[in-house]
Amino acid sequence: MTDLRTAHKPKQVYASLRINGTNIEPTKITELLKLTPTSTQKKGDWIQILETEIEYGLWVFSTKHDSSLHLEHHLLLLIDLLTPKIEVLQSIKDQGNKLAISGYALTEYENVESHVSLPTLRKLSLLPCDFWIDVYFEVSDDEDENE
């Protein structure tokens, strides 16, 4: 029997750990987790493009450096790094901060699919983090010209 589904590969996939809260001190989070963040911001930092101050601190570590187009691969990278740090993550969360593991996909197509196995989901569920997925659609130059 032929599988009639057509799945396109996304252009980019990665996962990240995001920690945010009003009292986050990014350098302290870096020291606690012993990971170099992909990006940080402090409460009160100025966002030029929005012409406003940031209302909360943010610390992000992502797997953007890895070129795999498989979400599960990126999640496993984070799980392997974070599982030994569960107590530290829980302590950060207990201080009133929000922790989330997020998966990202950038695609030109609507029918991109990804698979995450049950064993990976079980490992992910042991981390004191919410989980969410974002899919972003990239509009090609051709589509811009047609509008």
Image: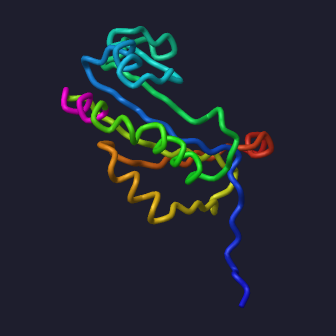
Residue 20 vertical position relative to residue 68 in the rendered view, above or below = above
Residue 101 or 122: which is nearer the viewer?
A: 122
Magenta span covers which residues? 89-95
Residue 83 x/y as whole percent: 39, 42
| Residue for point 49% across, 37% down | 16
Q: Residue at x 54, y 43 (%)?
A: 77
Image side of residue 24 versus residue 115, left or right:
left
The N terminus is located in which quarter?
A: bottom right
Left or right: residue 49 compared with residue 147: left
Is residue 92 within the magenta segment? yes
The x and y percentages for residue 6 are 71, 70
Quadrant of the drawing holding the C terminus:
top right
- Residue 126 x %, y %: 32, 50
Q: Residue at x 71, y 56 (%)?
A: 9
Give the vertical position of 145 relative to 53 (above or below): below
Magenta stretch prevailing secondary structure: helix
Residue 78: x, y in percent?
49, 41
Residue for point 46% across, 45% down = 79
Position of residue 92 relative to residue 115, above or below, is above
Q: Is residue 101 left or right of residue 74?
A: left
